[in-house]
Amino acid sequence: MASEEEEKEVKEQPKSKKLLIVAAILVLLLSAGGAAAYFKFIKTPTEKTEETKEVPSAIYEMDTFMVNLADPGGKRFLKATMKLKVSSSEVSEECKLRNFELRDQVLIMLSNKETLELVSTDDKLALKRQLIEVLNRALRKGQILEIYFSDFLIQ
């Protein structure tokens, strides 16, 4: 009788070993499948930057502005030169054609500012946002993306 029990154990061991091997192979295949799906469907940050194409832009340089500031006494002036980053070369051409309108808008805005409104970095950033908003209302073919001051002097 002992030999019959030993034979059953011997017969059961190969089945449990086979089951263990099959389970290990199944886990390995599922892991490999998961890794393949991850690399196929989930993109790394470098892949995303390669896919997103940068919008072509152009730069339009405006002539220097020199305006009296709205300070009491009226003895201070601002000299500023700006470059406009525009959404396309078409917009740059529009800026050239409508330069007089854009300059008018900028002159009106700058001449209504007081020295204390233009001193800090935050003040200059606020001025940029205001100028972009006003100038974009005048444009028809695109928009101004950014304004860069290449000269900004208050005297």
Image: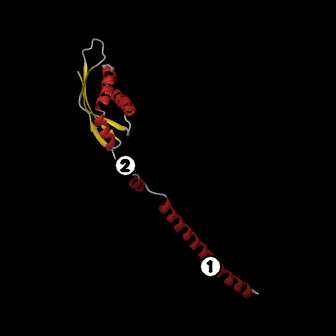
From this view, report whether residue 24 is shown above or below residue 136. below
- Name the residue at the right extreme: 1
Residue in the foreground of this view, choosing between 111 and 31:
111
Image-based side of 105 in relation to 34, left or right: left
Image-based side of 87 in relation to 152, left or right: right
Quadrant showing the N terminus: bottom right
What colour scheme has been applied to the protein in the rendered image? secondary structure
Q: Name the residue carrying label 2.
A: 54
Q: Name the residue carrying label 1.
A: 18
Q: Which of marks 1 and 2 is in front?
A: 2
Residue in the foreground of this view, choosing between 44 and 135:
135
Quadrant showing the C terminus: top left
Q: What residue type is labelled 1?
A: Lys
Residue under the image location 35 percent in, 42 percent down? 87
Mark 1: secondary structure: helix
Residue under the image location 41 percent in, 55 percent down? 51
Residue in the foreground of this view, choosing between 146 and 124:
146
Among the 4 quarters of the image, the one containing residue 149: top left
Residue under the image location 73 percent in, 84 percent down? 5
- Name the residue at the front extreme: 97
- Counting from the top left corner in percent of width and height, residue 68 is at 26, 19
Residue under the image location 37 percent in, 32 percent down? 138
Q: What residue type is labelled 2?
A: Glu
Disc 1 crowd rating (10 Å Cα; few below 14, some 14-19, many 20+) is few
Disc 2 crowd rating (10 Å Cα; few below 14, some 14-19, many 20+) is few
